[in-house]
Amino acid sequence: MNEKRQMSDTIRIGIMLAIVGGFLDAYTYLCRGEVFANAQTGNMVLFGIKLIKQNYIQALYYLLPILAFLIGVIVAEMIKRHFLENTKVHWRQIILCIEWFVLLIVAFLPQEYNMLCNIMISFVCSLQVESFRKFHGMPYASTMCTGNLRSATENLYLYFHTKDKKTLQRSLDYYIIILFFIIGASLGVIFINILNIQAILISMLFLILITIFMFVEQVG
């Protein structure tokens, strides 16, 4: 299968995944104990702070999502290796099914299980960021935006020096991804106010929709 023609490489999928990424970060921060499930840098900083303060229980609270993120990377690579040559199902479809199934479970876990929920969501985000790494052939991250912001601004700077319209388009594409990440976070706030912990079902629906898009493309 030609990787360049896959639905996973389109900006449409990139936008939807960015919405999910922003949504999940808002969800874990506002609804599950102020932990960032996507950007583990923040959890690493908080883990270090709690260690220095000798608050080891709270340090564990931030360490476990980091470890879940590492496990997610390994699982994603194992699935990719095993199903890469499979013509009946694409390995990314398997990843997406795992993601929305895990989020379905999280939606019905009460807040006494916030630590478990954050571990599960960090695992989901890790699967996503490891499996969907490009759109239009350009590297990006759908669950965090620091690298996207750097790439967008770098390409914008290059455009002003080269006047290359392709460079400008790349910059705009990155900024679009960032915009929809922010929109996803905003949607998270809105739906948390309406649905509380079950707001995560909205991000699950986006993942199901992406799975359907990829399936239609594969059989089309």
Image (spheres, rainbow, N blue to C red):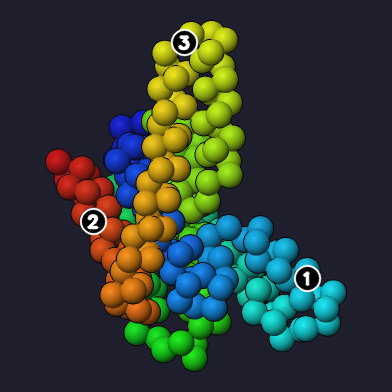
Q: Residue at 28% across / 75% down in the picture?
A: 194
Q: Residue at 78% across / 69% down in the picture?
A: 48
Q: In this view, does 77 lie to the left or right of 183?
A: right
Mark 1 belongs to which amino acid? Answer: Ile
- Mark 1 vs mark 2: in front: 1
Mark-to-mark CA distance, 1 and 2: 39 Å
Viewer can see residue 150: yes
Q: How crowded is mark 2: few (under 14 residues within 10 Å), some or many (20 or more)?
A: some
The image shows residue 17 at horizontal and vertical percentages of 37, 51
Mark 3 belongs to which amino acid? Answer: Asp
Q: In this view, does 94 lie above or below 183?
A: below
Label located before the other in sequence (1 or 2): 1
Q: Which mark is residue 49?
A: 1
Corner quadrant of residue 175:
top left
Closest to the observer, 174 or 7: 174
- Mark 3 vs mark 1: in front: 1
Mark-to-mark CA distance, 2 and 3: 35 Å
Mark 2 belongs to which amino acid? Answer: Leu
Q: Residue at 65% across / 61% down in the picture?
A: 42
Name the residue that disc number 2 marks: 209
- Mark 2 vs mark 3: in front: 3
Label located before the other in sequence (3 or 1): 1
Name the residue that disc number 3 marks: 164
